[in-house]
Amino acid sequence: MAGNLIPIEHNGPTIALKFFEDDLLLVGHGPILKIYNYKTSEVITTKRIFKKNKIHGITFDRDTLAFYGARSLSILSLNQILEEEELTKYEKMVNDWIIAGEFSYNGLEVYLLTAHNVILGVDSYSQTLQWEKSVWGEKSILYSGSIKVTSKYDVYINAGTVMGGVIIWDLYKEEIIHNLLGHEGSIFNVKMSENDKYIASCSDDRSIKLWDFKTGELLSTAWGHTARIWNLKFYNGDSAVVSVSEDLSSRTWNITEDEKLVANLTFELHSGRHVWGLDVKDGEMLAATGGNDGRVRLVDINPRKIENETQSFEIEDIVANSQYSVKKNEVVKGFWKLNAGLIVVTSEGGIFRYRNNEWTLVKVNLGLKNYSLTNGHTHKNIITFTNDKGITILFKFSDEGDLIKESLIASEVSKVINSISSIYNDELYLLIESPNKKEKLILYHINEDLEVVSTKFFGKGQTFVTTCFEIVGGLVFIGFRLSSIGIYDFETSEEVQLIKKVSISDTVTSIKTLQESQDKILLSVTNRDGYYLYIEYEKSTNLHTYIHTNDLRKGFLEGSIHANQELVVYGFKSSYFYIYNESRDFEIAYENCGGAHRLWKLFYENGNFDFIYTRSGALYIRSIECPNTPYFLGEGSHGREIREISIRQKEYKGANKLYVTGAEDTTIKLSSINFDTGKIRNYWTIRKHTSGLQKIKFLNDNLIVSSSAREELFVWKICENFNYPLISLFGTLNPSSDNPDLRIMDFDHIFVYNDHELKGFVLVTVYSDSSIKVSFFDIESQSFSPLISGFYKTCCLFDVKFIVHDHKVYILSGASDGHLSLWDITDEVQFKVSKNRLNYTETLELQNLPQPLNMIAVHQNGIKDFDIFKTDSGILVASGGDDNGLGLTQFNLNDETITSEIVSFVPNAASSTITSLSGLSDSRLLVGSVDQIIRLWTFKDNELRLVDAHYTTVADTGSLDSTEYKTSDFALVGGIGLAVWEIK
Amino acid sequence: MGKSSKDKRDLYYRKAKEEGWRARSAFKLLQLNDQFQLFKGVRRVVDLCAAPGSWSQVLSRELYENNKDNEVPPKIVAVDLQPMAPIDGVTTLQADITHPKTLSKILEIFGGEPADFVCSDGAPDVTGLHDLDEYIQAQLILAALQLTTCLLRPGGTFVAKIFRGRDIDLMYSQLGFLFDKVICAKPRSSRGTSLEAFIVCLGYKPSSTWKPSLDLNVSTEDFFKGANIGRYELNDELHYEEESRNVAPFIACGDLSSYDSDATYTLDNYISRISLEPVQGPTAPPYKKALELKRKGEIKR
């Protein structure tokens, strides 16, 4: 067949990883090998190793590499990989699944462990089978295993069975050394330590067991992962173990002197579900992990990492060098990090400086005793302490750390409950708040000589408590509890606007300026409940618009930092503090600090963070430096099944197009694809749905609709006024019942115009309980009103489309009973049709769905997807079913009585369920099915004919969408992973 | 099928509990039987991977209960590695289906006579690695098949659960060598959103040149060596070879008017809120202790 389908790029589960030479990391992305320079993220080469099978393992001896996966094997030299274009011709095959592969001691042979506990000896030069070895009666199936080559004659096979046993056998003696019993359930990984002292294993019971290799004695059992553990590795001279799991985390474990396995570090590295791949660059204690999300994470797993990054001081340590006697119950009450050093105030008014690893007493000020609110300006070396009586003491230090100036501000308030600061134009602004509702907020502008340049007074609501503020463009934005923002004119102190209920509840925790132009201010706002948004504020009209909204879903959200065009957020989740790069979707660091109720502050500069906090009276400084290797390699996608893809027709920034994906993980990703390179870039992961996505579609260039179970349907709006695209919630279709299983299976729309102005759209939604609803979305009010409601039968409706033909509006649906059904809703929809669009009318009433005009059984059971093509006489419907069939049905809409007929039907169009199809130019159809084959069909002259078929490495192939770019059609295919295809 | 199972969403789940089936999959066998008359004339039947036992319950009700007054009622043997609660007219064996002893025990029960029907509703634990899961599922079917080839009478029937993934056409092709007819059947009680289906193999035609025999030291791969069913066989050259594939005809079975397992039914609020006790409690999972530790707060970040 002609090669019309060309795979361009593949993002999918990453199982095999191997560090190689100084700075290379070999990564298997499905059947494709990518060699990265992991220090620079550069991709040195991308080569397909296997025709179909995925690379599950990589091993090497000097510069000869062996790749294995499923039943495939390939032995290649580094030169071959770098220089030859076509490598799949070297693919070899065995008769069984390969669990593990390793080179022999002298490199002349490759040992392959099969899933039936047999070792195949393959000559690495001739690549032919030399021998088979096994132990008698132990050929039951394995889920895991490893081969440990200790010397020419000492080769140990570690086999993990499905029945909870680990069989250790000697390859050349073909004898069992140990049958290690103790785990429950299938063994998912087993490894021997480098020095042959230990064996580590893990199973479905979610524990890791450490065994003595010599005696077979169980030394220790460790717990920690909350789902299955897929991979283990010894490192750091066999004194530690690293594990990766289905629970998305990687954990490290120390082997203590008394040979116990003790939990150490936990990293949350991937999204979706499963971490499969693991390798360690031992000398650098750098781990590479591969996730179902298609990403590779690089992480420092030095067992002493946290200790190395943490300094902690009891009050006695702080005063040790000073003539200062600690009072009973004296603790650290406030601190600020200055260029001059860390300045600390105690509950007794002792002020100390920590600089060059040394504590010095700066001063004792009894006025600051017991209640000190600390603020500062790091670069200007200014620190301020405010007490509850309204006295603020200001200190200025030299860069060398000497106290060079002191000052005092007495605020005329009865009491102070709050003192917060903000930097504007590199100057310090201090806000003082009294608990007395009648007393105004006082804002001081303080210059570097500690002089008050100006004082402003702002009124606030009776119940408001101030939490943060930001000054920009002559305005002061003040965040309050109860999720409100007050906007004040800086000059006149007048309230310009009050934005109430930014989120449902809780507190605004930060307001940060992202961009300022003549008339517009773009702010990022975080709310403690995890909700965050970008607000565009227009000064001339005082109008504010939410142009980006999202929910972090990670405990308490305390603030954000915008650096290098990326949004970094931080906060507390249960007992730890997290710093998370939200734009790029990865955790930067976490600190087990004991929870949110403590004195803490995060300082950021040039990619480095200092998280300073108190715990049980002691002061902790955790310094997180920007690592010298990238946080991740490869963009990746959802780590769960992608259920729907929609590509926007309009181009974005040159050769890119925006697209959205909806997945089983309940999230939506907004991304872009470059069709020249095949590279994807993710911008946002939107968390709003509470169950796996059913459908998501672009309606036009800036509106998107998504649907899922619980009758969730949301309208989204794209904004391109910023350096990267933004997406905000624009509308919600209210559910009709509280049935959590009621799924909105599909929807379609027609735009409605008022004269030439876009007024809204009519939306048809079909449900899993067979109901069909039509409603109108008004863009101005951002709300839906119902137009039509009714039922099909009692089965599940899978898909729906609107058809506008000859001044009539039709609904066409496909259902789990294999029928296509057509309704004429011209009268019920109430808007008049002209020129294929609907015209707005005002009075709308809920109508009943009429009886269908036509029903035709096309498939034996569920119609998984269909697409329609207009003809002169009506429409052609291409449909794909759970019955493996592909149908072409014609509806004649011009006749008095509407008729339909199946004009072409291919029963075995795929060997498994057809899940998605997309119409292309020239009467062509792209079809995806669970057999992992993408097929190109033509239906010229109303006959379905196969043009091309190509294997896709995306498993559970469930969605596809196509678009034209330059002179070709391109498609994105989604399932467990995402692939990019060109269709010639 | 526990109390808070995801399966709750379809009506078959409630129906199964109300009618006393141990799992909703009972309806799948009933619908398969309606389509293919699987039970007609069956005197000896083996249910493999039988726990918790809903297929054995169906066999008991349809074959044993209806014929227990006969002189010799049909014999039903259920095999699983897990223990199973007793069912009337069913002999349960807690045994490994790949073990030669299991075969001799079954034949002993059957008085040395071959089986008319072998079925398996077994599914392995899925890992999430699709290719591995498909491989393991195929191995499970092959393990069932190797026992089947040792005890099924010529012309007999074999039914097994499959997942319609990327290599299912290899399985169709290989079974085509051993049976007159191979059909992929999807009962309406099996959800359309699931890849689950059943392979119905009718008319067993044993090979005249290949004699199947169970041996502990022979893996399933080696068992089918020489059977000429189109399986790749290990060769010294390790050359790459595409095994033949074949698409089996697809038949959706069960009446269109029967309940739709993909649909959401609005039950009377009162009824839907009555929580039904599971017919048989779930077995203890291997990760029971991990769950306990987590619940006690002993597993932390």
Image (spheres, rainbow, N blue to C red):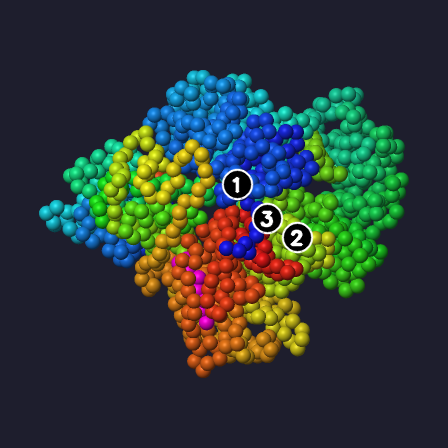
Is the C terminus of chain A in the top left, top right, bottom left or bottom right quadrant?
A: bottom right
Per the rendering, the mark at residue A9 is 3
Q: Are marks 3 and 1 on the same chain?
A: yes
Magenta span includes A977: no
* Subunit of label 1: A
- Horizontal relation, residue A158 to residue A543: left or right: left
* Earlier-in-chain disc, 3 versus 2: 3
Residue occupying image coordinates x 40% and y 30%: A117
Magenta range? A883-890
SS for callout 2: loop
Give, as a three-letter code, the residue at label 3.
Glu
Q: Please tell me whether mark 3 sits on a helix, a strand or a loop.
A: strand
Q: Which chain is home to disc 2?
A: A
Location of residue B192 by image quarter: bottom left
Which residue position holds label 1? A89
Residue at the spot 33% in from the left edge and 37% down from the top edge: B225
The quadrant where residue B86 appears: top left
Q: Mark 3 or mark 1: which comes first in sequence?
A: 3
Marker disc for residue A676: 2
**Residue at mark 3 shares a chain with residue at mark 2:** yes
Depth order, front residue of A584/A691: A584
Left/right of residue A285 with respect to residue A476 in the rendered view = left
User: How many labels sit on residues?
Assistant: 3
Residue displayed at 32% across by 32% down: B218
Amino acid tagged 2: Asp
**Numbered tag placed on residue A451 in the rendering:** none
Q: What is the chain identity of the residue bearing mark 3? A: A
Residue A99's x, y, as percent?
46, 33
Q: Position of residue B188 (x, y in %)?
A: 35, 57
x and y, in percent, of residue A294 in the image: 57, 43
Give the spatial CA distance, label 2 vs label 1.
27 Å
Q: Amino acid at mark 1?
A: Lys
